[in-house]
Amino acid sequence: MRTYAPKPAEIERSWHLVDAEGLVLGRLASEVARLLRGKHRPFFAPHLDTGDHVVVVNAAKVVLTAGKGDDRFAYRHSGYPGGLKRRSYTWLLQHRPEELVRRAVRGMLPRTALGRHQLGKLRVYAGPDHPHAAQHPQPLELPQARRAGRA
């Protein structure tokens, strides 16, 4: 029996809507990365983009556990000597929550052109509103991403 390899034209992409309110950042990011890569499909192929589009709303209400907000930093460099900047996760969560979620998901995708293409199917919004109603995103519940012991 031969292994089935999907053709790019045969892949039908669906849209998922994830409400990040009360979800732990890392657990949310791993589930979103799984959807973007297409690992939830029976015909997953690591060399093809078989994933779906994901819209994450309420990114400002994501949860950081174990004091990671002050212990972890997001770094960027201007390219000039002394141009290293760092922001704590707490600062990012308050001022740019979309970037915090996007960075967490990006870290769980391949570091290749395919991974960058898959990241392009992620849309993150700080509040509950999004402009993708025409795509009819299906709400996706992630109970395993809730904080342990909390409802």
Image (cartoon, helix red, strand yellow):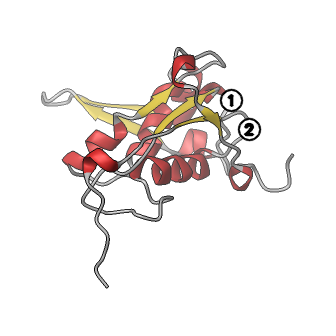
In the displayed structure, would residue 64 be above or below residue 133?
A: below
Residue tagged 1: 61
Q: Is 130 positioned to the left or the right of 21 in the image?
A: left
Give percent across and percent down for residue 89: 53, 35
Q: Amino acid at mark 1?
A: Lys
Q: Which mark is residue 114?
A: none
Asked if labels 2 and 1 touch by Cβ distance under 8 angstroms, the answer is yes
Give percent across and percent down for residue 79: 14, 30
Residue 61 appears anywhere in the view: yes
Which residue is situated farthest in the bottom direction here?
A: 1
Residue at 39% across / 62% down in the picture?
44
Q: Is 147 positioned to the left or the right of 53 in the image?
A: right
Nearer-the-camera pick, 72 or 102: 102
Q: Earlier in the sequence, mark 1 or mark 2?
A: 2
Residue at 63% across / 18% down in the picture?
127
Residue tagged 2: 22
Residue 88 appears anywhere in the view: no
Figure quadrant of residue 71: top right
Q: Is 75 positioned to the left or the right of 65 in the image?
A: left
Q: Amino acid at mark 2?
A: Gly
Give percent across and percent down for residue 17: 60, 33
Figure quadrant of residue 136: top right
